[in-house]
Amino acid sequence: MQRLHQVLTLDLLPQLGVYRLEQRLRGRDPFSLFALSEPELVDLGFNPQQITLLQNPPIDKLQTIEDWLSQAVNRSVISYYDDDYPTLLKEISSPPMLLFCEGNQGLLHAPQVAIVGSRTATISGKETAKRLASDLAKQGICVTSGLAAGIDGFAHKGALLGGGATIAVMGCGLNTIYPKSHTTLAKEVANSGLLLSEFWPEITPKAVQFPRRNRIVSGLSLGVVVVEAADKSGSLITARLATEQNREVFAVPGSINNPKVAGCHKLISQGAKLITGVADILEELSHYTLIRDNNVSAEISDDNNQTTLNSPTADDIVLANVGYEVTAVDVIAQRCEMTVEQVLERLLMLELSGWVSAESGGYIRIQGEA
């Protein structure tokens, strides 16, 4: 069996991430599993479903990846067990088994700084993200972000304008660009940088995948810069993950009257470094040899079947409490008697499926009765 088929099969094993698999291996080479008998696999702790996959890999499903790779010369699949898997990403608590790449995979080993922030950013926030990214790119630092609307998109654009490189970590498979408005940007990133995902190419967006993407954004980077983030923001998840991964966290301050920077101020109060320009970032990261030399050019562990977004029903309590005027997330949560986190997860799914739109100050309903 080809090595590609083997690593793809390892990724398909249900209820097994990299570390759980490592525990099962007990020091064995992971590829030796395919030569073991059923009793030997049982002895290592594999369950019947996992054993079936190891002994009878789904060839048709694996072939789809070979077909995907053959459609463009700049596509590749990197596994946790490959020598070119990024070192920093191996350090996090849940590294992805596979990385699907389109573009320059060598950028995975370049010094990176992540820039993240609000999807509904102000003009000032967008310009700040673009300027920081451009300045970082001019210093030979790769800018990493999540290809989301708002700050993420302007971070990628700034890096490209600065003549440097950028990595876009996607929360879905590489065959689906989300948001669709970033289709052209994604092509530019693939041509001059790298599109990256742990999800198989045909996997479509759903809410639970985006926090998984965030851990890769921070895990690849030496530090994370937060530009405009509300007090309850997905960007704060990325910042928390960065802290857990022993990465530097930076925050751009703003007006105390702007709710979009409340999360940044919260991070600063918790110890994040306040920055006003790239010099502040470089100063904090100067102990990293790769950046100091300044010469470097530039993991969803479900069943990995193609997924679809949940469609709202007539009794969808979250959708029912979003008005045709902008409704604040806190207000929606109060009406639904749910936590803000639960509401945000459902709102993202509703947004992805076209029922609501994120606006300044909250969400607005854009379709009729469910």
Image: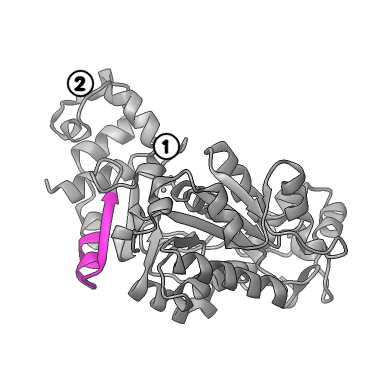
Q: Which residue is drawn at 61% across and 55% down?
A: 280
Return the mark for residue 40.
Answer: 2
Identify the magenta region: 65-78
Looking at the rendered image, the quarter that the C terminus falls into is: bottom right
- Looking at the image, residue 182 sits to the left or right of residue 52; the answer is right
297 or 71: nearer the viewer: 297
Return the mark for residue 91.
Answer: 1
Element under disc 2? helix
Q: Does the magenta stretch include residue 336?
A: no
- In which quarter of the view is residue 240 placed? top right
Q: Is residue 74 magenta?
A: yes
Measuring from the top left, give residue 239's x and y in whole percent.
62, 48
Q: Residue at x 28, y 51 (%)?
A: 78
Q: Is residue 352 visible?
A: no
Measuring from the top left, give residue 180's x and y in whole percent.
52, 77
Q: Distance of mark 2 from mark 1, alpha carbons? A: 30 Å
Q: Is residue 336 visible?
A: yes
Looking at the rendered image, the quarter that the N terminus falls into is: top left
Label 2 vs 1, first from the N-terminus: 2
- In which quarter of the view is residue 48 placed? top left
